[in-house]
Image: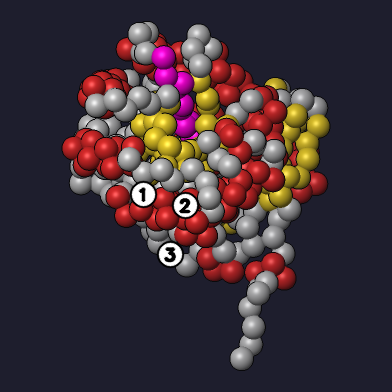
Amino acid sequence: MHYFEYKDNELWCEEVPVKAIAREVGTPFYLYSARTFTRHFNAYRDAFKKRPHLVAYAVKSNSNLAVLNLLAGLGAGADIVSGGELFRALEAGIPAERIVYSGVGKTRDEITAALEAGILLFNVESPGELEVISEIARKMDKRARISFRVNPDVDPKTHPYISTGLSKNKFGLSMDQAFDAYLRASRDSALEVVGIDCHIGSQLTDISPFKDAFDRIKLLVNRLESEGIRLSHIDIGGGLGIRYNDEDPPLPEDYARPILEAMEDMPHTLIVEPGRSISGNAGILVTSVLYTKTTDTKEFYVVDAAMNDLARPSLYQAYHDIQPVEKKARGTATVDIVGPICETGDFLARDRAVQELRPGELLAVMSAGAYGFTMSSNYNSRPRAAEVMVRDDRFQVVRERETYRDLIKGEHIL
Ligand SMILES: *Cc1c(COP(=O)(O)O)cnc(C)c1O
């Protein structure tokens, strides 16, 4: 569900025509719907309202300050994976006690900053990391709250680059490793063992892997209890998929049901770390056609957005629905929609049937709110796109388009 809809054959975001924004801001730009973010966040809140829980939004999916601030106001926490994301989350007003910190490569500086801020907990991913956190906490005269990220070894059946819960992936500890690590951590006075965490992958469209992962975690929770180690938090990660094309992903309430059932007799606070399912369909990328071009075998629409703006098609062969901002009574063309970058991999869509378009006309790349702007780069010295947010009948630039000056910021000639 989202609030990008056609009225009289023109694409609107909530109460604002997309074309009007393009006229003022130029293209390409990311466009976010505050109402859609709110709806998606509230779906999680409602799904889990029967028990103590925290929705820790995965900042890496879309980390714009306006997005984080909007979610903070709705009661969201944050799942962060870097010191930069910690900084953003705090700047946006997400309280430290609602922040969980995941990731396999936390540096000493990042750990120190997180301890100083007083985050809810670290999701620890290796024995080496545990030692470093303990050492730093002791030096700071603090107790670090920790969970271990376990790897339940279930196959999420998603793209291999975004599956994380298999034993061959770099994430987390195996169940046996984790058990030993819990015993060690529980004897360490600089650590407070509070929870257990997993995150098995992204864009999952089936509930059963979540349920399998939860069952395995529950076994370990029970085994730890028999050793006298009582946890207060269980974190089941993120990963719920969205509709890009013809997927039929479960709703947060369908996803919640088996977890709530399995936790009926458990007192733990549940943490979820959704990213894509909150931000994905809350954003689009708006781009203009620069040229239409025909070769012997193909027709191309060259547009002003490229793989540096939206990497997912090139990186994961991901499908994004592409729609004209104005629907016209014209034929359909089957085209490759490509950007200006000097790489054959620079495409937004291949062999796609779209309404015939002319230079200067606008396209909307749908479902681009997650892993869109956050994965964008300056490749080919392209300034990163503007980000705009609509709320009801108003829009605001929430990140200015980069300038050429921004491109060389911090560079020095020898
Ligand atoms: C990326 C990530 C998430 C969010 O995943 P989505 O598929 O966007 O919901 C949650 N937790 C961790 C640890 C992650 O790395």
Of labels 2 and 1, the one closer to you = 2
Of labels 3 and 2, the one closer to you = 2
Identify which residue, 148 or 226, lies in the foreground. Answer: 226
Amino acid type, residue under disc 3 in the picture: Glu
Q: Quadrant of residue 33?
A: top right
Asked if the residue at label 2 sits under 8 Å from ligand 1, the reply is no
Between the C-alphas of marks 2 and 1, the distance is 12 Å
Quarter of the image that includes the C terminus? bottom right
Residue projecting furthest to the bottom: 414
Amino acid type, residue under disc 1 in the picture: Leu
Q: Which residues are magenta?
A: 267-276
User: For mark 2, what is the residue?
Assistant: 138
User: For mark 3, what is the residue?
Assistant: 343
Give me the residue at 71% from left, 25% from top: 14
Indicate yes or no whether the magenta region holds residue 19.
no
Q: Does any portion of residue 369 appear in the rendered image?
A: no
Give the mark nearer the N terminus: 2 vs 1.
Answer: 1
User: For mark 1, what is the residue?
Assistant: 130
From the viewer's perspective, tell me whether residue 131 is left or right of residue 95: left
Asked if the residue at label 3 sits under 8 Å from ligand 1, the reply is no
Give me the residue at 23% from left, 22% from top: 226
How many C-alpha atoms fall within 10 Å of the one at disc 2: few (<14), some, or many (≥20)?
Answer: some
